[in-house]
Amino acid sequence: MRRKFAIALTAALLALVTTRASADAPYTTWTSGPGGYLSMTQDAYSPVAEVDLPVSGPEDMFVTPHGVLYVADTGNGRIVKLVDFQEVASYGEDVLESPTGIFVDGEGVMYIADAKKSTIVILDADGNLVNEFGRPVEPLFGRNREFLPRKIAVDARQNLYIISEGSVNGIVQMNTNGNFIGYFGANTAQMSLKMILQRMFLTQEQLDQFIRNEAASPSNITIDHQAMVYTVTAGTSFEKSIRRFTISGKNILPEIYWSSTAFRDLVVSENGLLLAVAADGVIFEYNLDGTMLFAFGATDTGDQRLGTLTNPVAIERYGDFVYILDKDKNAVVVYLATEFARLVHEGIRLYTEGYYVEAMPYFEQVLDYNGSFIMAYQAIADAHFKQRDYAGALTAYRYAEDRNGYSEAFWELRNEVLQQYLSQALMWLLVLGVAQNVGTRLDRRYDYLDPIRKRIADLKQFRFVDDFLFMFRFIKQPADSFYYIKKDLRGSLKFALLVYAWIVAVRILSLYVTGFVFNPNPVLAYIRVEDEAVYALLLLFIWNAANYLVSTISDGEGRVRDVVIGTAYSLFPYALFALPIALISNVLTLNEVFIYTFSLNVVWAWTGILLFIMVKEVHNYTFSETVRNVLVTFFTMGLFVLTGYILYVLFNQLFDFVSAIFQEVRLRG
Amino acid sequence: MAESISLRRGLAVLIAAGVLLAAGSAGASGAGSPPAAAAAHGQAPPALSPDGRPPVQFIAADPRDLAEVPETYELAAENALFQLYANPETLAFKVVDRRSGYIWHSNLDEKEEEDRLNRTWTAFAQSGISIDYLDRQAGEERNSVTNAEHTTEFALTGDGFEAAVTFTDPSITIIVRVTLDANGVRVDIPFESIEENDPAFKLGLLYVYPFFGATRGGRIPGYMFIPDGAGSLIRFADETKAHNVFYGRYYGADLGMITYLPYDPTVRRPFRISIPVIGMVHGEKENAYIAVVEKGASYGQIVAHPSGIITNFNFLYNSFIYNQSYFQSTNRSGAGVTTLQQNTNAFDISIHYRFLTGEDGDYVGMARSYQKYLVDRGILAKVEDPGADIGISLVFLGGEKEKVLFWHRLIPMTTVEQMAAILDDLGLRNTDVVYYGWQPLGASSMPPDSLKIDRRLGSEGEVRALAEAIRTEGGNFYLYYHPQAAFFEEKGYSPRYDLAMSISRQNLGSYTYYLNLAAVTERFTGLSEDVGTILSGGLALDGIGSTLYSDFKPGHFLNREDAIAAYQELLAGMGSRASFFNPNDYAFEFMRAYYDMPIFTSGYIYATDTVPFLQIVLSGYVPFYGAPMNFSSNVREDLLKHIDFGVYPAYYLTQEITAQILNTPSSWIYTSSYGQWGQEIKETYAWLNALLGPVKGQSIVEREQLRDGVFATTYSNGMRIVVNYTDRPFQLDDLVVDARNALIQDAGQ
C-alpha cells in the first residue's frame, strides 16, 4: 500500500505535498452511516494544492496512466499538455475552435470534441491532424437529430462514445472514420402523474404546446480499464444520475441513495472506485455497487480556502491523487487520499475482486477508525458468511442493516438448530399429545379438573373477566355478540377503553419486537413512541366520533356506548394476534415472507369484517345501508382531519398577524 | 522554489539600494520634553542617541524612498530605543527604531504611478484615521482625514501627541492619543472621547492606522502575520492568488447581533481568531512589529490586503465596529426590516505596536514578544510541573442518554471504576484527564449547578479517590463543563428567564442556546465551588473561554467587553482549577492547560506558511494538547506536526464499544473504545515523550526550515527537534532524519 503511494508521487507532486502551508480541510467528510443517515467520518481526501494553469475557461482534462495532463483549453481553442503542471506542448491551435472534451489513448492519440465547430478532431501524439468529421450522414442517426459533441471517450477497439448535447437517444457511437455505429445507453423518459393526467384529458394540439417529455441526455462520460462505459446525467432523478453500462448498453449500477442531481464529471479507477463531482463542489466516492463511501467538498463562497471549488468541470484520478479542473479558477485543485481513505480503498479493492477474507483485516482496521462505517460491516459480514461463521455474519449484517444477508445468515443458523433438535422436538410433541389425550380421558372419567372449572365459573362473576371471555364469542358468533352489546347484556365501556389502551400498547410493542428482517425501522432508537401513540389514539377517536355522528343522521340505532364498545370488540383480532405475529417474525427468514404477510393480512381483513358487522348490527342496517354508512364514515373522518388542518393554519396566520403588529409597533412606535 | 528565488532577489535589491543617508546633526536630545521636541521640528534626527551610541543610519521601509523623516513630521517624543514623529495634518506618525535606524511609517507619503490607488483609497492610505458612518437607513459613507472636511486639534503631550478630529459632515468627533513607551507605541481612542453630535448619523467603523507598515508588492521581502489557526503568514509578492481581502473578527462573530451562526454541516468553519495580534516582518531577521489590541478587541476585526487586490500594497490593520445594521424580522415567516442598532457600542481602543529588530525580526520573535507582553502583565504564568514526562490529554465519555419508550436512560460508556482501570493499564504519569458526560443522564443533558455525578457512573467518593490518585501521579483531573450552553428541549433551565437574547429579540443560538450572565454566574459558581472543595479537582471549561456574545435582553444589556470582564471576574473567583478548550486570550490568565490546540490554518490559498505562533507564545508556560487523535485521518503526519509544534497528544476514550452511542447526540464520537485505542496510545505516547520530554517546560526560541518539508525547532535549553515530513531521509550533519520521522539533538554541541 505504501509502496504504491511512493510510486504515485512524482517530484512535482512531492513538492506540492510538502509545502510550508498546511491547512485544515474546509469541508467535513461524510459516509453512509446507520439508519440510512449520513455519518461524519475522518477526512478521506486532504486538499493539497490549487495549481493555476495557463488556460482560459477550460472544460475538460485527461490524465494518462503516467500522470501526463492534457487540458482542453476551451477559451484559447487548443489542447495543452502538461507534465508536473508545467506546459510542455500545445496542440491543435489551427484546427480547434473551442474544445470541450478530450480523451487520450495509450499511444497518445488525442480525440477531441469541439463544441463550436460541432466536429470530432483526432490528432496524433505530435499534434498532426489524423481525421476530422462532423454530423454522421447515415440515415440511422435520425433525420432531424443535431450533432453537438461535448464530451468523448474511446474504448480499446477505437469505438468513439460521444456525448452530443440534447441527444435523447443516448450516447453517439462512431468509429475513427466518422461512421455512425449506433446509439448507446439512452436514458428513459420519466412520466409523472401530472403528465399521465395531461395525456388523458388534453387534445393533441394542447399537448404539443407543452415541452415534449424527452429523456435527459447524459452530460459526461468515462470509460474504465474493462471498457465499461459510465455516464453522469444532470437534471435527472438523483438515484439514476450515475449509470454504468454493459457492452450492450444496459445499465447495471443499482439506484444510488446518496447522490446529486448536478453531477459534472466522473472517473473510475482500476481498483473499483468511482468518483464524481457535482456543480456545487461536492465530491462523491462510491464502490462499484453504488455504495457511497465518502462525500466531501465545499463551494468557494469568497473565502478562497484551499479545497473549495467554484465551477468544477472535470475530475481525474492519478494514484492517490484526485485532480479537479475548475473552469472559473482556471486551475486544477489537487486532493490526496488520507491514510484512512487508503485503508478503505485497499479493502474495497480486495472486496471488489472477491477476496472477502483477505479484505477483512482492512475493514476491521477501518472500524477501529470509525465504528459507523456501514460499508465495512457489510464487507466483514460477507467475509464471515463465506467462512461459514454465520453467527459472526449475523451480527455484522445487523450492523450493516442488510436484510437479505441477515435473513440468509439466520436461515443457516436456524437450519443448524433445526437439524440438531428437530427429531427431539417432534418426539416431545408426540409425548405431549399422548399425555394430553390420556389426561382428557382421565378427566372425563374422574372429573378431577372440576375445581378449576368451578374457579373459572366463579371468576366469571367479575365483570372484567366476563368482558374478556366475551371477546372469544366473536370468533364464532359475531353478529349475535354485537346484539348482546346493544342490549347491554354483556361488554362494558370500561373494558372497551382497556381494549383501546391494549391496542395502542400492541401497536407500539410490535414496532419494537418485530424481527429485523421484517421491521421497517432498522434502528429502534428512531421510533417516535409519542407520535405512534397519538396517531393510533386519534384514529380510534375519529372513527368512533365519525361513525356515531354519521349514524345518528342516517337512522342508526346505536348509541355512543354501543359504537365504542362494538369497535373495541371488533378490533380484538388485532389486539390478540398482532403481537404474536410480530414475535414469530423473529424466527422467520425472507424465504417465509409469505407466512408473515399473509397472517398479518388475515388479521386486518378479519378486523375489517368485524367492524362491518358491528356497524350493521349496532345500527340495525341492511347490507347496502351498512356499505353506505361505512363509506360516509370514512369521508367524515377525512373531513375531520381536513378541518383540523385548516383551523391550525388559520390560527397560525392569526397569531403571526397579531405578533407582527406588535413587533412593528414596538420597532417603529 | 520560485518564491525563495524572488525572496533572495528582493534582499539583493534592498542591499543595493541601501544608500543610507547619514543623519545630520541637531542639538536637542532632551528626551521627549515638549520644547525640545518642538525645537526638533523639521530637523533631521540627533547625531547621538541618548546612550551615546554612534549616529543612527536611517533605513526607509521602501528602498526607493529617501531614508529620512519628511519635513512635514515633527518629533513628538523619544526614548532610549525609539523616536516618534507626528504629522499634525494627517495624524500620521513615524517611528525610528534607534537600534537599526529603521523608519516605521503609519501612512503613505508619496503616491507612485503603479500604486493603483483611486482618490478614496489614496485618502485612506494617507490618513491616520478613517471612519465609515451610517445614516438612518443604514447607508454607509467613508470619510478619511485627508479627503473629508474636518477640523483637527493637535497637541503634543510630552510622551506623544493627541488629536481631536471632528468630521464635519456627520458631525462625529474622535480623539486619538499616540504615546511612546519602552517597547513601542500605543494608540488610544477612549470611548468617552467619541461624540456623535448629529442624531442623523452614527459612527459605523473606525479604521486605525490602516497603512501602518504597508509595503508595495514584492519590493521588499517579508510577510504579514494573521492569527489564523496555529498562525498564518502571507508573504509579500507582486502577484497574489487572493481575490478578496482577508477579514477576521476577533473572538468570532457576535451572536448577539446575528442570533446564531448559519449552520452547514458539510463546511468546516475557518478557525476563530483567538488572540488580538497582527504583525508584519520587513526583511526576515531585520525588522518586525506586532500590534496587540489591548482594549476593544471584542469589537475589533483584522483586515489584510495582500498586494494585488484593489491596490498594489500589502497592508493589514484593525478596524472597530461601533454601530451595525441588523435585520429585524417582524413575523415568523421572515419578513422584516433592516435597521440600525440603538446604542453605540461602548469600548475603549488601545493598540500597542511593539517593534522588533535583528534576530527577533521574524514570526518567532513576534510570538516571543507577545509572550513577554503576556508575562509582563501577569497574564501568562508558568504552570509548575516537576515531572519529566510530557502530558497526555484523555477525555473520557462517561455516559449518554437514549430514549426508551417515553423515558430516557443512561448508557454508561465509562464508569469511574473503568476509568481508573484504564489509567492503570496505560500506566502513564502526567495524564490530564477530563471526564465528559458525568452529569445525571450524561453528555447531552444539562449539567447540575452542584456536584452530582450520575450514580450509574460512580459515587462522589470514587471520583474523589480517582482525582487524588491522578494528582499523586503528577496528573490532573477535570470535569468537563460548558457553562454557557443550554441544550434544546432539555430540562434544567428556563427558556424565558435564563437565556441570552439577540438584538432582534430572539433566544441566542439554535439547538444549543446560550445562557445569560446571571444564569451562567449562578450555575458556574455553585459547581466550581463543589468541584474545588469536594473533589479538589478542576473544571475543563468549554465555551466560556471561547464564545463571546453580547446580550440584548431588556434590562440586562451586556456588551462583549462587559462580558469579558464578567467572565474574568467569574474565573478569578472560581474555587477550582481550570483548563480550556481553544480559549481566547482573555482566559489565558486562569488557564492550566490548553486543549484543541490548532496545528493547522484555515487554508486561505493566499496564505503561504503555517507557523506555530500560538505554540511559541504558550511554550514553556502552559501545556497544550492537540485535537483528539481519534478523528485524525493522517495519523503519522499529524503526530509529526505535534512534535514539530511541541503539542501534546489527546484522545477520546470510552470503555464500551462506540456502537452503543451510534444513535445518540454523541454519535460525533465515532471511535473511542479503549480496546481499539489502548495500544495505539501507548505507542504514540512513548514516541512523543522521547522527543518532547527533554524540552518539557522550555520555550521555543528559534525555528527554521532546513529543506522543503524539514523543520528544526530550538528550545531555550538548547535542545533542537528536527522533523522530516517528506518521504525521503534527510541528512543532517552526521545524523540522518528518517523519512516521516523526527529526532532530537543538543544544538549546543
Image (tube, rainbow, N blue to C red):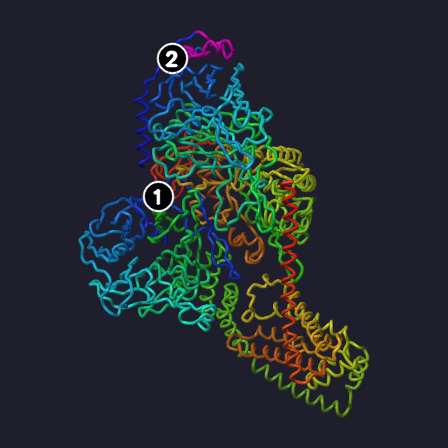
Q: Image point 42% across, 59% down: which residue?
A: A261
Badge 2: residue crowd in 10 Å (few <14, some 14–19, many ≥20):
some
* Residue at the farthest bottom position: A445
Q: Position of residue A157 (x, y in %)?
A: 24, 65
Q: Are marks 1 and 2 on the same chain?
A: no
Question: What residue does disc 2 label?
Answer: B23
Please state the extent of the stretch shown in magenta in the rendering. B27-51
Is B47 included in the stretch rendered in magenta?
Answer: yes
For the stretch drawn in magenta, the main secondary structure is loop
Which of the two residues, B627 or A289, is positioned nearer the viewer here? A289
Disc 1 from disc 2: Cα separation:
47 Å
Helix, strand or loop under label 1: helix
Q: Position of residue B220 (x, y in %)?
A: 35, 27
Answer left or right for B385 relative to B734. Answer: right
Asked if residue B433 shows in the view, the reply is no
Q: Relative to B205, does residue A448 appear above or below in the rendering?
A: below
Question: What residue does disc 1 label?
Answer: A16
Which of the two residues, A594 or B197, is positioned nearer the viewer here? B197
Which amino acid does the dot numbered 2 rest on?
Answer: Ala
Q: Relative to A34, does residue B626 appear above or below in the rendering?
A: above
Which of the two residues, A184 or A363, is positioned nearer the viewer here? A184
**Quadrant of the frame with the C terminus of chain A:** top right
Asked if residue B254 shows in the view, the reply is yes
The chain to which mark 2 is attached is B
Is B405 included in the stretch rendered in magenta?
Answer: no
Which amino acid does the dot numbered 1 rest on?
Answer: Leu
Helix, strand or loop under label 2: loop
The chain to which mark 1 is attached is A
Badge 1: residue crowd in 10 Å (few <14, some 14–19, many ≥20):
some
Answer left or right for A460 relative to B147. Answer: right
